[in-house]
Image (spheres, rainbow, N blue to C red):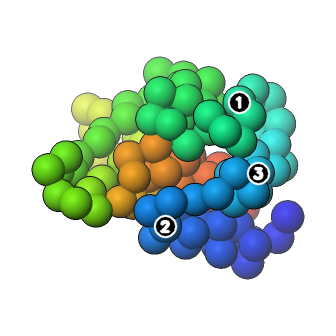
Amino acid sequence: MKDPELDVLIKELETSRDMSIADFDGVIHALEFLLPEVETPGPDRIGTTDQAILIADDAYPDWSVHIRGRANDRDGHWHCTLREDDSRDSDAVIGTGRSPVLGQAVLAAVIRLAMAQKQ
């Protein structure tokens, strides 16, 4: 996969409210490309918040996961940040994601962080 394909995938994660199984298949392909050591669930489960957090934990153990948003908004406004060191503001890279769906915000942050580390 090339960066433009990954950018399109992140945009889909961050803007779509109802991703299809085919769309999530692309997410699995991206994760397998960027983080081959990380186990990924099937496309029917990868978009759930629990699975997205497990992927983040598997890919970046001991990193801090910050989630903020409003659960009462119709479209949700979720933000996720992955940081290596929560106590200082000196991280070399930070993964960020935002989406109307919490699990997709986490996945966007994981993919964005993996892309930054590959460069």
Mark 1 surroundings within 10 Å by alpha-carbon count, few (fewer than 14), some (14 through 19), many (20 or more)? some
Picture coordinates of residue 85 (x, y %)? 37, 34
Secondary structure under tag 1 reads loop
The Cα–Cα distance between marks 2 and 1, rounded to whole angstroms, is 20 Å
Provide the residue designation for mark 1: 41
| Three-letter code, disc 1 | Pro
- Is residue 49 shown left or right of residue 30? left
Residue 109 falls left or right of residue 114: left
Q: Which residue is mark 3?
A: 25
Quadrant housing the N terminus: bottom right
Can you tell which mark lies on residue 76? none
Q: Few, some or many C-alpha atoms within 10 Å of disc 2 (few <14, some 14-19, many ≥20)? A: some
> What SS does tag 3 mark?
helix
- To which residue does mark 2 refer? 16
- Residue 103 visible in this rendered orientation of the protein: yes
Residue shown at the point (44%, 62%) measured from the top left = 17
Q: Position of residue 11 (x, y in %)?
A: 55, 72
- Residue closest to the eye, 98 or 113: 98
Q: Looking at the image, which residue is at 38% across and 46% down?
A: 102
Q: Are marks 2 and 1 in contact (CB under 8 Å)?
A: no
Q: Position of residue 89 (x, y in %)?
A: 29, 47
Q: Amino acid at mark 2?
A: Ser
Q: Secondary structure at mark 2?
A: loop
Question: Identity of the amino acid at label 3?
Answer: Asp
The residue under the point 76% across, 51% down is 25
Instruction: Provide residue 106's location: percent of width, then percent of height.
Output: 46, 45
Query: Mark 2 and mark 3: span between their CA atoms?
Result: 15 Å
> What separation in Å lies between label 1 and label 3 (alpha carbons)?
10 Å
Precedes in sequence: disc 2 or disc 3: 2
Q: Is residue 94 visible?
A: no
Q: Earlier in the sequence, mark 1 or mark 3?
A: 3
Check whether the beta carbons of the residues at disc 1 and disc 3 lie within 8 A of each other.
no
